[in-house]
Amino acid sequence: MSRIYLSPPEVGADERSSLLEAFDSNWIAPVGPDLDSFERELAARAGVDHAVALSSGTAALHLALLLSGVGRGDEVLVPSFTFMATAAAVTYLGATPVFVDSSPATWTIDPSLVEDELATRARAGRLPSAIVSVDLYGQCADYDALTELCDRYGIPLIEDAAEALGATYRGHAAGSFGAAGVFSFNGNKIITTSGGGMLVSRSGELVERARYLATQAREPFPHYEHSEIGFNYRLSNLLAALGRAQLRGLDSHILRRAAINRSYRAALQTTPGISFMPVAAYGTPNWWLTCILVDPEDFGADRERIRLALEAEDIESRPTWKPLHLQPVFAGAPTVGGDACASIFERGLCLPSGSGLSEDDLARVVEVVLSVAP
Ligand SMILES: Cc1ncc(COP(=O)(O)O)c(C=O)c1O
């Protein structure tokens, strides 16, 4: 029996031929027709007009924040319950992340805490320069509430949709809500280019400026001319070719991950002490990862016991995000609440959810989880 991974890439004949066609056409680097097409196709999927393909989601976050005017000494509201990259990009600009707790009903940033914090900061004349929302584990944040607050206070919203390509909120695509949206095509995401990202926006101006900064701020001269410092952040044409094939498979990846989620629920939701990440009525997730909460009293063992039992059977699972306000590197950082996401971290476990997971493998995971209960 081979190891079961948490969320491995699923690639096939389409990916192989797309990649080889790009290779054979000699569009190896740095730009090329697949890159342009991938940007157009991804933008269409995200419900926006403009996109620039980048080397990672982190690079996309960095440029999104920079182009929203975030700079040295600024503060940016970010959820505490997310992957490190969301806040790391804030620090690249010399700004400070302010960590906001999750809503237990969605696990995404709690709009009522954001509202209170903005009111307090407005009175003190210290509004943040931007707010980053995260569409967590493939579920959108609550955009009616967040966009209303951002509009009310004139603060740019950046949507970290790294995990949520294909998800929707009230019928609108993830990635389309902020001044800029960010996707990741890291190897564990719902589609992958092995590594890569995309910055999307309704603003062509913002995306063109990102494109310029991502290519070392090179100006249109025959020689190399630079008036600003830029970055080497572009995705290669070869990887874009891979991304295009993956994007064609996105809907089937979503369907499979949704079916996996349903199967886990059918098998585990009546087990005392096990519950699932709540699904908000306002949208449809892309079901990137299925996450459970384990109540040690009711289940009879904690989530770490389950994780170790799975590992002993060569099955990869992972605790839900360790909140960023609890990370050593952010010790002493400003936080707004924090108990809700700390409690999810204590009890949360992400189960193998890859679109290539077979029924037999899924049954194996369920069997091991249930075997841990005394
Ligand atoms: C919420 C979130 N933001 C940002 C990133 C960063 O993306 P990348 O790994 O492509 O830099 C990731 C995943 O890796 C993520 O899960």
Image (cartoon, rainbow, N blue to C red):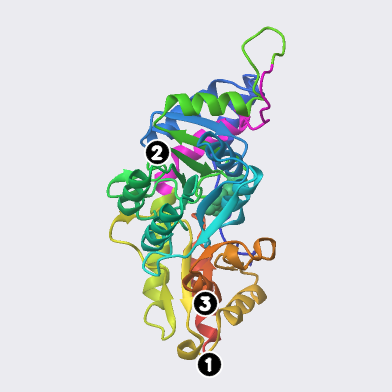
Residue type at the position of mark 1? Pro
Residue type at the position of mark 3? Arg
Q: How many marks?
A: 3
CB of mark 1 near ligand 1 (< 8 Å): no
| Closer to the camera in the image, 117 or 174 | 117
| Closer to the camera in the image, 278 or 87 | 87
What is the CA distance from the residue labelled 2 to the residue labelled 3?
33 Å
Which portion, as a residue range, is magenta?
226-252
Residue type at the position of mark 2? Ala
What is the CA distance from the residue labelled 1 to the residue labelled 2?
46 Å
Classify 155 as above or below 363. Answer: above
The answer to whether residue 240 is magenta is: yes
**Residue, far top:** 222
What is the CA distance from the residue labelled 3 to the residue labelled 1?
18 Å
Who's the residue at 52% across and 88% down the image? 373
Question: According to the image, label 3 marks what residue?
Answer: 347
